[in-house]
Image (cartoon, rainbow, N blue to C red):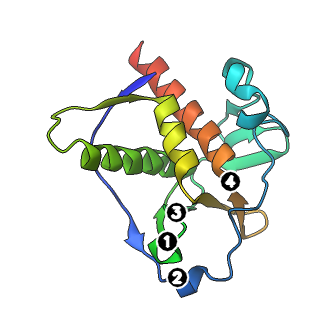
Amino acid sequence: MVRKVPFASRFRRLPAAALAGLAVGGVAAELVCGSGGVSGGCSKRFGAMCLRQTEEGVRSPGLELPVMSHTILLVQPTKRPEGRTYADYESVNECMEGVCKMYEEHLKRMNPNSPSITYDISQLFDFIDDLADLSCLVYRADTQTYQPYNKDWIKEKIYVLLRRQAQQAGK
């Protein structure tokens, strides 16, 4: 799967003090494929993923997310806490697009003279893995709280999003 790069970014600074009490990166979330997720074997068989889109939202075993769930993306590119940033989105899909755009901005900085850059999903996933921390907080209306999710969950959501986009482009 190869994606052509449009360049944009929606990141804003968040003072480090505001994030001091959040320990989101270490929280293990229930992944879409069960307890295995990307790291537990789904990367070899994404086609069998237990996820489906419904009118109410995205559904999987033990997880329901409305289509329009306010989502906060927390990013720490390096071990330096001063580099922490966040972005907020109206939906999980918009947030996953934001992660892709963050990588595309990185590619643009690394290749300033290239008029067009392509990459595949494994390169995007390597970039995500190299970040010191990347987490999402997704609003759940039923509990009126934000549910934290880790890098593996984010990678699964990005895979589903890009696969859907590739299928729609092929029609």
Mark 1: amino acid: Arg
Q: Which residue is disc 4 drawn over?
A: 150
Q: Nearer the N terminus, badge 1 or badge 3? A: 3
Judging depth in this view, the residue of 147 and 7 nearest the camera is 7
Task: Give the residue drawn at x 74%, y 39%.
Answer: 59
The residue at the far bottom in this view is 17
Q: Is residue 17 above or below residue 121?
A: below
* Marks 1 and 3 in Cβ contact (< 8 Å): yes
Location of mark 2 (residue): 16
Among numbered discs 2 and 3, the one appearing first in the sequence: 2
Q: Residues within 10 Å of mark 1 (few under 14, many from 20)?
A: many
Q: Which residue is mark 3?
A: 75
Mark 2 touches mark 4? (CB < 8 Å): no
- Residue 33 spot, x, y in % from top left: 78, 33
CA gap, disc 2 to disc 1?
Answer: 7 Å
The tag earlier along the polypeptide, 2 or 4, is 2
Left or right: 142, with 166 as reference point: right
